[in-house]
Amino acid sequence: MEKALPFRFFITHPKVAVLEWDTEANPSPLKQLIGFQEAILKEFNEVSQITQGYRSLMLYHNCDIHYLEDYPNRLYLLFDSLSTFSFTKQKTWQIPVCYEESMAPDIKSLANQLNISTATLVREHTSANYQVNFIGFLPGFLYLSGLPKVLECRRKSTPIPRVDRGSVGIGGKQTGIYPLESPGGWHLIGKTPCSLFEPKKKNPCFAKAGDSIQFLSISKL
Amino acid sequence: MIEVLLTGIHSSIQDLGRFGIQNTGVPIGGAMDLTAMQMANSLLNNHKQSAVLEMCFKGPKLRFHQSTTIALAGADMNAKLNEKPINNFRAIKIKENDLLQFGNAQHGKRTYLAVAGGFKNPKILNSRSQYQGITPEATISKTKLIPIGQVDLNLQKGARLTLTEPNQNDIIPVYNGPEFHLLPKKAQDQLAKQVFTISNKNSRMAYVLVEKLVHELPSIWTAPVLPGTIQCTPDGTLVILMRDAQTTGGYPRVLQVSDEGINSLAQKSTKDQFQFELTSF
């Protein structure tokens, strides 16, 4: 019986290919995604950059993919050769957040919706260890996994046109920080003075896929 | 320096964009019609990365505070230099105090103004492309002075272009997107045969189409996208992601517009119609 391929390979543009993992077979491919990314960038000069989603990678090539020899076979061989998937230098970041009502316009209504006190909401939100899956949607917007089940909720039925930069929100099974002012449909439960995105810096976003995030409650001062 | 007397409807400085940091959520950006941008730069022997002024629908009113050479490419925007009409696709000498103004775009929607040496607003994250949240402003603003290159061009030498037609291509080449195969055949045929109309929701970020797709595709796990990716939302709305689009998305990606196709779409706007041409590799 033929062994199932570890990921699907699909060419969507002459220079761009998508690698997709089956989440039924592999519910948490994050380690593989990050580790494989690093290996590809090291081994293949033809790949100029890689972007990432929950279960996929997008490979940008600096030439037409059809001119590449033995492709994607070489990708599959590289994948098979990696016995473990580790990623270099994961960091843990502690992000200070003020959960006081003046900074958290939706904290009371969300606590009501979830049938818990605001104190419990804050305690749950700050006790979890979140993992950065990838960055997307907006510059510096971290897609975090690890939201405690008790905090899962429905998004607002009508998103608001303007969410302040630095706002911390919860929506569905996700939590995150709005790095820039933007429209948004998440419940806003706090604000951080930290900047998630610094365009003037060479590395504009301090966090990377694979890093851990913890939220720390701070007072308004 | 160039002084902005009137901004025009949507004028922004653009170059080839910010490539290589999409994994921090930064869009590539850059000129919507890259072919027109390249033409304008080529006429002045500019480096292909040189920043140009992208003018949309109706251009600005500009006063030059230095002599230079300019070139225009893209839609016909009825350009007037010191009140006298000038043509696209020509290198044109500019003297200090010259006044350049534009009317409404015809035969397209976007016109590119290149200057010898390029526009020189500060680079942020390696590009001069204006983008809300990265550069101080998303568009040029009134009374501001924009720095430009100081290059003296000898017009006797260098590239010339035969006066060429603006891009009005109504056939947009596309490739299958990663989720195309999940569409029912009826929907796939609809994509190939339907004449599509651009709705009034169109911008540098995305073009929303009027005609909807009948489908039952679920959302996808948030996945990377790139300019030209066509998403299909739960109610069947088709969204063509353009240069300033976000870098990831949770909607099925049904088609991918070719590079050439994006440049053609850049010259279209509300109520313009076109058809897709499904292309295989």
Image (cartoon, helix red, strand yellow):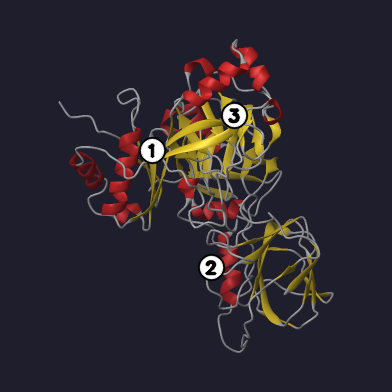
Res A114 quadrant in image? top right
In the displayed image of the protein, which residue is found farthest to the left?
Answer: A1
Amino acid beneath label 1 = Gly
Q: For the residue labelled by badge 1, is the local secondary structure a helix, a strand or a loop?
A: loop
Determine whether the residue tagged by mark 3 lies in a helix, strand or loop: strand
Residue A37 versus residue A204: which sits nearer the camera? A204
Q: Are marks 2 and 3 on the same chain?
A: no
Q: Which residue is mark 3?
A: A169
Q: Are marks 2 and 1 on the same chain?
A: no
The x, y position of residue B29, in whole percent, is 57, 54
Image coords of residue B254 (percent x, y)? 48, 36
The mark found on residue B49 in the picture is 2
- The residue carrying pointer 1 sits among few (fewer than 14), some (14 to 19) or many (20 or more) residues within 10 Å by Cα, namely many
Q: CA distance from mark 1 to mark 3?
A: 20 Å
Q: Which mark is residue A114?
A: none
Q: In the displayed image of the protein, which residue is found farthest to the front?
A: A221
Q: Which residue is mark 1?
A: A210
* Along the line of sight, the residue nearer the viewer: B51 or A133: A133
Mark 3 chain: A
Residue type, numbered disc 2: Gln
Q: Which chain does the residue under circle 2 lie in?
A: B
Q: Position of residue A46 (x, y in %)?
A: 32, 56
